[in-house]
């Protein structure tokens, strides 16, 4: 850390402290918005080539604490210099080109330096999550152990907050040569080893999926695929230009945080202001204050982050915010509900936020990050379609009049250059506009496969290198509308029922104060599927809980014509993925374990 501080652009001012006239206060200045070099928009072959150019300017990364105070900066120049030194230290451990290096991805300069150090050394880094809930010690250690084992990592690093977790997770793994902290690595010698230039065909990193539907898998991303996606993001998706500045709370272990808010700004030489994810979760207002204070123009969020801002920020706080600078409010990484966007826009309109700033997009780790973007400056567009036709005929019939039950889907935009999206039916045939089917993607940023998992790779990559995203959706006027995950469609008596629709029924009930629900299906040995709805609820009275349960069962039956099991659980107990999304896979598994239903379920239901 001392090496980083020594290179910071800081000013020393005499402290006006009556206790000691000799004290000095370090005033750290954030990196500038406007760069000293001409902007280049990702026209590089590799990540390190992009960093070499960014290092010739004055922009970089800025890290803020929970109170919104700037605690450290990392210019691209210092990042380049420190990464090259750390690269030689990693090679000094006996690591060789192609070895995997695990890094627990806290929001710190050290993570960024280590990630780029791996690329300078020809090593393959991958980010591992920080715990969503520190109370889940054993679960977190098990998660890390599984990733370390599956990746066949040769080295692993974590800061002081998480090194004990990492040490436990590393036990019994013979391939791991070294486990330690960034500070311990800094104490090692940096032998004068030649650093090789990266090649476009090399693996740039592994991206572990968040595990919302199954065990996380390591997506292999090449330098060529990465740079293709980054160029599409900064040029076509965001239309980056001089004067842009980014702000982010997204975790570095999530593809939107790593690619979208760490790499994309660097390849366009844009400065970024970071707030740690855990600090955002406690006080989302700080993220909005960063945008307002530093006049940030680009900031992304998952929908639940916008929802958190709407619920947690008080009206009295709006007086100190000016969000009129925010031109690209990217939204993605999960199903985008129009009501969340409308509520956010209404809440923050007094602070200058414009509905036209919304920028819905669609992507997934298997395509590096982005696949489609809507148009900047136009806000979000949506279609309301007949709910009955969607369920029974898999057709998105647009509603022209009010009064009928409908589903509303957000326009996620058109594919980036070099990418194609098509919709197919169960027989693999391409479907026309407004027909719902599986979403397939073809393009220059598609993964080469899952690391050490040929069966999963074969399942995901269809003939012709078409990526099966696992999502359902439809096209209309070349724009993509995502309707849900294939695994989130519950088939009961031949009817396709969206889990999201069942969950929304619960979330509309006033007693469900936490407004969180998870719906899924379980199939017994007689092949009868039942919908299960698990919801977080604060009710304590037995009578009130029974009343809510009966009401929900009646609503589900009235809406879908099927019976439903309802389980009420305490607030903050529904399982989430490392990126913060609710995990139906884990919710189903937990329900089965709690209710001792394992022996009564079919093999498919237990394995799903």
Image: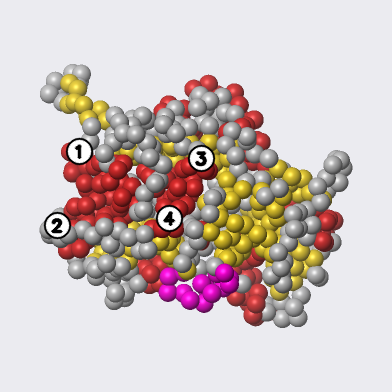
34 with respect to 325 (left or right)? left
Q: What residue is at 15 percent from the left and 60 percent from the top?
A: 193
The magenta stretch is 450-464
Residue 597 location (% of width, % of height): 65, 75
Residue 253 location (% of width, % of height): 42, 54
Residue that carries the numbered disc 4 in the rendered image: 226
Looking at the picture, does residue 224 appear above or below residue 39? below
| Mark 3 surroundings: few (<14), some (14-19) or many (≥20) residues within 10 A | some
Q: Which mark is residue 125?
A: none
Looking at the picture, does residue 575 appear above or below residue 292? below
Work out whether residue 68 can be spotted: yes
* Circle 4: element type: helix
44 with respect to 603 (left or right)? left
Do the residues under discs 4 and 2 have CB atoms within 8 angstroms? Answer: no
Q: Of discs 4 and 1, which sits in the foreground? A: 4
Say how many tags the image has.
4
Is residue 460 part of the magenta span, yes or no? yes
| For marks 4 and 1 on the same chain, the one whose residue lies earlier in the sequence | 1
Residue that carries the numbered disc 2 in the rendered image: 190
Q: What residue is at 83 percent from the left and 56 percent from the top?
A: 389
241 with respect to 109 (left or right)? right
Q: Nearer the viewer, residue 320 or 118?
A: 118
Q: Nearer the viewer, residue 264 or 581?
A: 264
Residue that carries the numbered disc 3 in the rendered image: 238
Residue 177 location (% of width, % of height): 24, 70
Distance from disc 4 to disc 1, alpha carbons, whole Å, reads 29 Å
Q: What residue is at 44 percent from the left and 37 percent from the top?
A: 247
Distance from disc 4 to disc 2, alpha carbons, whole Å, reads 29 Å
Q: Of discs 3 and 1, which sits in the foreground? A: 3
Residue that carries the numbered disc 1 in the rendered image: 7
């Amino acid at each position: 850390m001392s090496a980083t501080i020594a290179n910071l652009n800081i000013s020393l001012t005499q402290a006006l402290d009556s206790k000691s006239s000799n004290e000095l206060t370090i005033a750290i200045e954030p990196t500038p918005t406007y760069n000293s070099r001409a902007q280049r928009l990702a026209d590089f072959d590799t990540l390190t080539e992009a960093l070499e150019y960014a290092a010739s300017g004055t922009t970089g990364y800025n890290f803020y604490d929970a109170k919104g105070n700037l605690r450290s900066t990392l210019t691209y120049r210092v990042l380049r210099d420190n990464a090259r030194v750390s690269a030689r230290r990693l090679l000094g451990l006996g690591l060789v080109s192609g070895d995997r290096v695990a890094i627990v991805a806290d929001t710190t300069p050290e993570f960024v330096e280590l990630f780029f150090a791996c690329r300078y050394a020809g090593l393959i880094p991958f980010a591992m999550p920080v715990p969503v809930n520190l109370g889940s010690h054993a679960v977190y250690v098990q998660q890390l152990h599984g990733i370390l084992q599956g990746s066949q990592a040769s080295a692993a690093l974590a800061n002081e907050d998480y090194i004990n977790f990492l040490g436990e997770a590393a036990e019994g793994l013979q391939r791991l040569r070294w486990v330690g902290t960034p500070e311990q690595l800094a104490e090692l010698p940096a032998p004068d080893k030649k650093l090789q230039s990266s090649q476009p065909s090399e693996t740039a990193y592994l991206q572990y999926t968040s595990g919302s539907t199954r065990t996380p898998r390591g997506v292999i991303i090449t330098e060529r695929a990465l740079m293709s996606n980054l160029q599409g993001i900064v040029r076509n998706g965001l239309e980056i230009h001089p004067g842009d500045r980014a702000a982010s709370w997204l975790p570095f272990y999530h593809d939107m945080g790593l690619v979208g808010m760490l790499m994309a700004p660097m390849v366009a030489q844009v400065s970024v202001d970071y707030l740690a994810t855990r600090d955002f979760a406690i006080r989302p207002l700080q993220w909005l204050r960063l945008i307002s204070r530093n006049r940030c123009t680009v900031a992304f969020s998952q929908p639940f982050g916008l929802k958190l801002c709407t619920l947690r920020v008080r009206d009295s706080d709006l007086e100190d915010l000016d969000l009129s600078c925010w031109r690209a409010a990217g939204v993605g990484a999960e199903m985008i509900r129009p009501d969340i966007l409308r509520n956010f826009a209404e809440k923050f309109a007094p602070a200058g936020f414009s509905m036209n700033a919304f920028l819905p997009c669609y992507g997934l780790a298997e395509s590096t990050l982005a696949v489609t973007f809507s148009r900047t400056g136009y806000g979000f567009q949506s279609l309301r379609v007949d709910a009955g036709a969607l369920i029974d005929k898999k057709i998105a019939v647009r509603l022209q009049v009010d009064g009928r039950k409908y589903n509303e889907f957000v326009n996620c935009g058109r594919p980036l250059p070099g990418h194609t999206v098509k919709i197919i039916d169960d027989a693999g045939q391409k479907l026309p506009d407004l027909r719902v089917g599986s979403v397939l993607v073809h393009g220059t940023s598609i993964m080469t496969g899952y690391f050490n998992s040929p069966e999963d790779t074969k399942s995901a990559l269809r003939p012709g290198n078409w990526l099966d995203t696992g999502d359902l959706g439809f096209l209309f006027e070349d724009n993509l509308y995502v309707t849900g995950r294939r695994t989130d469609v519950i088939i009961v008596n031949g009817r396709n029922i969206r889990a999201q629709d069942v969950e929304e029924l619960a979330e509309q009930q006033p007693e469900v104060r936490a407004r969180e629900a998870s719906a899924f299906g379980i199939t017994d040995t007689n092949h009868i599927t039942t919908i299960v709805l698990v919801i977080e609820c604060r009710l304590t009275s037995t009578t009130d809980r029974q009343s809510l349960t009966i009401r929900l069962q009646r609503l589900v039956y009235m809406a879908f014509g099927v019976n439903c099991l309802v389980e009420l659980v305490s607030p903050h107990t529904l399982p989430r993925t490392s990126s913060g999304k609710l995990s139906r896979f884990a919710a189903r598994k937990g329900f089965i374990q709690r209710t001792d239903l394992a022996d009564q379920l079919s093999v498919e239901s237990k394995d799903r």
